[in-house]
Amino acid sequence: MLNFPGWKVALIAIVLLWGGLLALPNAFSDGFLGVRPVDTGATDAQSVAEYQEQMEAAEASWWPGFMPSGKVNLGLDLQGGVYLLTEIEPEEVAANRLETLQADIVQALNRAPLIERPQPEQQGTRLPIMLNNPEDMDEALRRLRRLNPTVGAVGSQKILTIERQSDRLIDIRVSDDAMAALAADAQDKMIEIIRRRLDPDGVSEIAITPQGDTRIVIEAPGEADPRRIKNILSQAGRMTFNMANTDPSAIRAAEATRPRPGWELLVDMDGRPILVNRTPVVTGSDIATANQGYDPDDNSPAVDFRLSGAGAERFGRTTANNRGEIFAIVLDGTVMSAPRINEPIWGGNVQITGQFTMQEAQDLAAIIEAGELPAKLNFIEERTVGPGLGADSIKAGTRASIIGLVLVGVFMIIAYGLIGGFAVGSLFANIVLILGALSGLGATLTLPGIAGIVLTIGMAVDANVIVFERIREEQRSGRSPATAVVAGYERALATILDANITTFIAAAILYMLGSGPVKGFAVTLAIGIVTSVFTAFVVTRWFTAMWLKTFKPRRLSI
């Protein structure tokens, strides 16, 4: 137990050194570390000055590129930001799903025309179907039941209830059970789409967590403007490529009466009317990637996106067959761009240009790539947390940690003498390892997370106390210092592992079942358990072994 060969010493030193290097960036500013600020597109004088100052500091930084530069991410309650509670309506989700199924229903019944109206009028989550002849009822029911899809975790819940109301009327509804399953499925999709819209690079500490079956909590630390997030999430994200007509006489005729069948009158970003064909050539599902780019003419921000193989082929054929015509790129009912087709566009690379700021182009690219929302998000609660409150919380948490560390250190030295001092040294190493692990994992530190660190400070010496009491008992029974230390560590190992494993299991359950601050507490607690066992059972024992081998005392002052 007291034998530390060279490879063990080297391993301990590497762990402590690596933890210290990961924790070191938290002591410096982003500019000192060479981290370039994110261009938010803000134009006010203060924001521009702060951006330029951070950029100059980053360019002047001498921090080596091979050194870690990641910091602990601070949560909403520590650095301020935006808290949004959103909700989706199960009825709307069900109505949207029924609308997507309506085309299949009409196609199935029109193979040999059975229905009276080619486009039945949907009424929310209900779709009435009127047949031409009563004798077609059995055939229509057979066709409808064959295409009725399923929903749910095991795919056993039928979405539609299909009932015969009269000799010619069939009533199609979304059942209540299917509505709940569709809402749960939409919630999962919503979370993924929201994450891809707000954090397309996957590097932000934005927290998106479900609440119940229909609500989603969004926490964006560091975000000062909730309107930007709400604008991003308020757009459905439905994108289509349609043939269009910008002829003034055709537009005036459509405005005076109504557009001819198959066409609709939309407006562009400047409010100008454009006639658009209702049948899209390409839809958002055909878009493979989207990102912010630049207009080659004036280098202004633009949106570049690439179509998938099938979409690129279909788009290429359309542009080849319609030279000189206009096509419109439509997002949520607004024409984003309406260029003229001068030559075939093969390869599927398309660009949207306009009067975009850098931030607007980035947000639009994220919306396009993330895909269409399955339903509208309703914002039912909104809170903006100022950074001042977070700064006070950090100061209070730091003060509590320091006071706790000092009190624990004083107690350990008074109670166990020099060997208690070794425990205090390993306690410092424990805190450094916790910060290093949080920085390396990119974890988010919240106010409950600070509470977890304070709790870890007390728990970290718990293992040392168990070991030291065992050593004291062994020494009282007449053992030498070396054998007493060996016996103390051997006999305390099982107790230490039992206590920490049960606590780790509790932290894991909190992480799996909790959300937001509860998860932050669970993460720091779990990391603290691992690091405290390492520092107590390895680092403190190493300090003690080195001291015993160097000074060879006859008796431990413990």
Image (cartoon, rainbow, N blue to C red):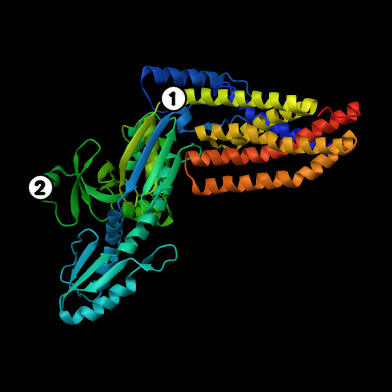
* Identity, as a three-letter code, of the amino acid under mark 1: Leu
Counting from the top left corner in percent of width and height, residue 209 is at 44, 45
Residue at image coords 18%, 50%: 264
Which of 400 and 447 lies nearest the eye of the viewer? Answer: 400
Furthest residue in direction front, as rendered:
477
Task: Name the residue beneath numbered marker 1.
Answer: 389
Q: Residues within 10 Å of mark 1 (few under 14, many from 20)?
A: few
Does 287 appear above or below 230?
below
Mark 1 and mark 2 in contact? Answer it, CB < 8 Å: no
State the CA–CA distance, disc 1 to disc 2: 59 Å
- Which of the 4 image quadrants contains residue 451? top right
Does 8 appear above or below 372?
above
* Identity, as a three-letter code, of the amino acid under mark 2: Ala
- Which of the 4 image quadrants contains residue 415? top right
Does 140 appear above or below 412?
below
Which label number is shown at residue 555?
none
Does 62 appear above or below 465?
above
Residue at image coords 66%, 44%: 500
Question: In this rendering, would 488 be left or right of 194?
Answer: right
Residue 66 in sight here: no
Question: In this rendering, would 218 be left or right of 322?
Answer: right
Counting from the top left corner in percent of width and height, residue 184 is at 39, 55
Secondary element type, mark 2? helix
Task: Name the residue beneath numbered marker 2.
Answer: 253
Looking at the rendering, in which quadrant would you find the N terminus? top right
Counting from the top left corner in percent of width and height, residue 543 is at 80, 30
